Amino acid sequence: MSIAAQSDPTPSSATDIILSVNNIEVIYDHVILVLKGVSLDVPKGGIVALLGANGAGKTTTLKAISNLLHSERGEVTKGAIVFEGQEVQNLSPNQLVKRGCVQVMEGRHCFGHLTVEENLLTGAFTRRDGKAAIKADIERIYDYFPRLKERRDAVAGYTSGGEQQMCAIGRAMMARPKMILLDEPSMGLAPQIVEEIFGIVQSLNEKEGVSFLLAEQNTNMALKFARYGYILENGRVVMDGDARSLAENEDVKEFYLGIAEGKRKSFREGKHYKRRKRWLA
Amino acid sequence: MDILYKILIDPFLQMGQAPDLFVQTLWEGLVAGVLYSLIALGFVLIFKASGVFNFAQGIMMVFAALTLVGLHAKGVPAFLALALTVVVMLVLAIGIERLVLRPLVNQPDIILFMATFGLTYFLIGLGEVIFGGEPKTMITDALYLPRGSYEWKAFGGFVAFQKIDIAAVIIASVMVAGLAVFFQKTRIGRALRAVADSHKAALSVGISLEQIWVIVWFTAGIVALATGIMWGARSDVSFALQILALKALPVLILGGFTSIPGAIVGGVIIGVGEKVGEFYWGPLLGSGIESWLAYVIALVFLLFRPQGLFGERIIERI
């Protein structure tokens, strides 16, 4: 059941789409089938949310795109990943970053023993445009993340979770990406900080023109900032549509937002409903 | 009472009575320590960047020295031979990355450790086939390394400084300073530290692990070459030298596996401790304590400070 985006009803022309994932299948360790045919498109300059419960395959999808799967003994066995009109599934993460697609991993993964500023500098590893340009970019990142500027000389391992998330996003921005794969930025953070980070992501998207593919469990928050969303379940896309229609969809409300018929329901009832529906299907 | 006197008082009296001998012992300890540090440095570099404990570090030192001496024996001028040896170390680094590290990526650390055992025996065999197994003399003169010694009249006697030892200390210091600047200030150095911190995160920002590994093994190879020249000049270039790599273990335990300053300070403490211990306390135990004292010091450290003097603090958020 596809509900087309309002702004761009038929995102078919290849030029409008920065990233396109076509029916990929991912197998870990040669035996464990994790993704069973996932397809999605990210329009140029868009924010697309990838939603779903734990273990649905969100992180695997992002890692398949950024090619970090390989270092975890995962493999894309079917399908194609097209970034800016070219197939990229055989590129190394390093080559992909050079082309402008960077992942911010789940759990932030800052370099704990490096200072915040050194973390940002490592983000510019693939760039060859000289120290001055990199320095200017660091200042630009500090404009978006004033907290990082205050903490620039602090060892990243000792900064707060929110600061580390900002540091990880800032570090990714230092590669001058066209697209960021952002995995679960809200993980373990206070709602206020999550809101702040999503706000910054939105302004990076608007002012710097970076496209985002955002994997989130926090469905409510993700649908507030994204324009389009895909819902994954058991390694398959089960639903997609533009953010507003997803947020209003009864099933989404029931399963992911915990609301049904206008009132909150208990988790148990939701689960029961879900189970019955699966049985019938 | 007598034994306590011999342990606690007599050695210090001796130090006071013959300060020139004491200074001489300290100096010799310092030189040995600096050279231990260089070996330990090779371990630290590789351990930090690839998480591998490189058992082959000792043989890399011998192999580098052998290549240098062997090339010179074939008639290559000394400095060209030095340059060629550097190239050989680079080829070795690339070969190790391609044939050992890359196929074993994501395997448990112990497998990589075992692989470095294999590497050790491979290099021993290769070295013997190419250069023969007999001990050789280091080409000290051809490399313009000084011979002889300075004698410093002081403390009512004299202290002798071997010129080669002075050169060793200077070369080691320059090397360490160079590495420190490289790690702190350069783009590649920062990337090395990033890789040491988290392989996955380094991959995600576009750092190529393959490139970093080659650089790190090459750097360790250069350090091995310098160490090989210095040790070779003090004794002979022979496969027996690789035993010295085992002396780096207590240095690493003392200094911490991940710390370059730790390797230096640890090396000096072990070197000085060994010589002073041997000279003043050795006779009590019938001498020969030099060969095991370092390990005892290391054992005490393992009990009280397992991460070493300068080992990276384990940062954990609670």
Image (cartoon, coloured by chain):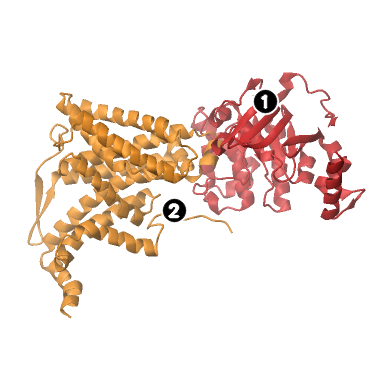
What is the quadrant of the N terminus of chain A in the image?
top right
Residue for point 54% across, 49% down: A156
Q: Position of residue B165 (x, y in %)?
A: 17, 46
**Quarter of the rendering containing residue A20:** top right
Q: Amino acid at mark 1?
A: Gly
Q: Using residue A83 as the reference point, say whether residue A50 is left or right of it.
A: right
Residue sitting nearer the eye, A28 or A10: A28
Residue for point 17% across, 69% down: B12
Chain B shade? orange
- Labelled disc at residue A79: 1
Q: Residue furthest left?
A: B157
Q: Which residue is mark 2?
A: B312
Chain A shade? red
Q: Residue furthest bottom?
A: B1
Residue sitting nearer the eye, A112 or A134: A112
Residue sitting nearer the eye, B290 or A202: B290
Circle 1 — which element? strand
Residue for point 48% across, 41% down: B107
| Image vertical order of residue A249 relative to residue B306, above or below | above
Q: Amino acid at mark 2?
A: Glu
Circle 2 — which element? loop
Q: Using residue A79 as the reference point, say whether residue B104 is left or right of it.
A: left
Q: Position of residue A266 (x, y in %)?
A: 85, 55
Q: Residues within 10 Å of mark 1 (few under 14, many from 20)?
A: some
Q: Position of residue B144 (x, y in %)?
A: 15, 34
